[in-house]
Every structure is written in structure tokens, then in C-alpha cells.
Amino acid sequence: MSKSPSSWQLWLMAARPRTLGAAIAPVMVGSAMAFETGARAWLAMLACLIGAVLIQIGTNFANDYFDFIKGADTHERVGPTRVTQAGLIPPAKVKSAFLLSFGLVAIPGLYLSWVGGWPVFLFGALSVGSGLLYTAGPFALAYLGLGDIFVLIFFGGVATCGTYYVQTLSLSPEIFWASLGPGLLSTAILVVNNLRDRRTDALSNKKTLAVRFGARFVRAEYLICVIGASLIPLCIYLFTGAQHLFSLSACLVLLLAVPAIRKVLSMESDPRLNPVLGETGKLLLIYSLLFSLGWLLS
């Protein structure tokens, strides 16, 4: 007879630890590129990491809550268990959890705003707002099909460039190019999620791009995201006049992505896509680690 999960295991399930790579990866890339300039702002780096993880966890709690309230998560769900829909944690407690998570962002956020000024405060507030409004409110981003572009912007440009900026107090063309890597692969994770949930999302009027344009469109989107991210290091290498040679090792992620690509191209609204979420998340972390180490070693 199996034991019921404990309270901390339920909260860990709600936090979705497998998604936290999307928060860690841009901080890793931004910090590596900052270190290469000679910056050693360890406290700012730590604050970025804590803030990014808290925003991701708060967003996960909010999605769990609002997708249940809006009827997107039902007994027909094919994805991993959601604690609110499954009745494992009361909705009111999940709501309090996402409010607490977003509120705690103020601790590292105020320090980073002191370091980087009002632009950092503004983009930090926008990051929290986008995490909340991803599924909250009558014009929720995910329900309008805007989730993909916001993931690209906030898990790519904002997180990566913001991390670099608070450590160097400057920006460069290279960091903008580099931010596309984590952004595209984070978007690829969302694409798999939306492909898997296409049928149930359509029933709940959640108009993701998979619902609006169909499976063929988002399969092509997945390919573009993975291939595009894999080519970013090459673009930077050519743009910088053949510098940072070892960062090209991140291009190898395209070879590692072949099994995931095959599954995405052959499956639709299928629970067998669940492992592909984890595989794509691993690709994101491997890519970011290879690029960061390569950038520092070059």
C-alpha cells in the first residue's frame, strides 16, 4: 500500500522543480559573460538567481491556481498532476503561496534596484507582473496565445541582460544575442506543454498558439526554437570576429535534441510528451552550461 505524499512533497510538486532550469539558465549565461569582463559582483548574481527562482515558483503556483479556477485543468488533464485540480492542496492556500512567492521577490529586487537603478526596478516589476498575468485576469497572456513571446522576452532578454547589467552596469551587443539562447529553449519547453494540452485547452477557451494554429504550426515552432538557439553561439562567434571559440560547444545541443525533436514531430495531445518537457529542460541547462563555460575558457 503506497503512502500518501507529505505536505512538503505536495508543495514541491506544486513548485514544479523541473521548470526551474528556465530561471537558472539565463542567470548562468548573464553571469558568465559578466565575469569575462572582470566583474565579480557575487551578491548581485545571487540576488538575480534568488529573484528569478522566486518568480518562476510564484508563476507555477499562480498557473496551478488560475488554470483550475478557469476550468483549463480538469480530470481530463494529460499532463503531470496539478495540486489544485487534484484536490491535494486547497485553492486558497495555493493562492496565498503565489502571493507570498511574488512578495518575497521584493527582497532581492530592492537590492538589485539599488545597484542598477530604476530600469532594474521597472523590469523586475514587469517580470513579476507577467508571471502573475500569464494565467490571471480576463486578458491572461496564456489564454490569448501571447505566452510564447513573453517567455522569449522575459526568460531570454530581460533575465539574461538584466543579470549582466546589474554586475557590469553596462550592456553589449553580445549579451543581447546570447539572451536569445535561453529564451528560445525556454519557449520550446512551453511549446511542448501547449502541444500536449491542445485539446483540453481548446475546450476551456485557452487559445494558445497550438489551439489557434494547430499542431503542425507548433511543431515547426519547436524546431525553430531548438535550431535557432543552437545557432546563436555561431552567430556570436562570427559577429565578434572569431572570438570565444569554446562557446561553440553549445551548438552540440542540436545533436542531443534529436530524440526530443522526433517525439514532438510524431506525437500530439499525448501524455507521452510529458518526458519531452524534462528532456527539453535538460537541453536548456546543458546549452547554458556549455555556452557559459566555453565563454569563460575562450
Image: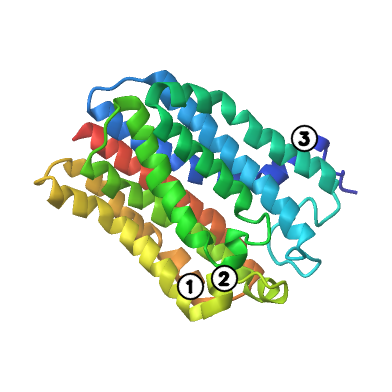
Between marks 3 and 1, how big is the CA–CA gap? 35 Å
Q: Secondary structure at mark 1?
A: helix
In the depicted structure, whether residue 166 falls above or below residue 80: above
Asked whether residue 256 appears in the rendered view, the answer is yes
Give above or below for 121 relative to 84. above
For residue 266, the mark is: none
Question: What amino acid type should be assigned to the residue bearing mark 1?
Answer: Val
The percent coordinates of residue 136 (x first, y second) are 67, 54
Mark found first going from the N terminus, 1 or 2 = 2
Residue at which label 3 appears: 8
Amino acid bearing label 3: Trp
> Residue at 34% of width from left, 26% of height from top?
167
How many angstroms separate mark 1 from mark 2 (CA)? 7 Å
- Whether tag 3 and tag 1 are in contact, CB under 8 A, the answer is no
> In screen coordinates, is 177 left or right of 131?
left
Labels 1 and 2 touching (C-beta < 8 A): yes
- Say which of 228 and 153 sits in front: 153
The tag earlier along the polypeptide, 3 or 1, is 3
Q: Nearer the viewer, residue 120 or 75?
A: 120
Nearest to the eye among marks 3 and 1: give it. Answer: 1
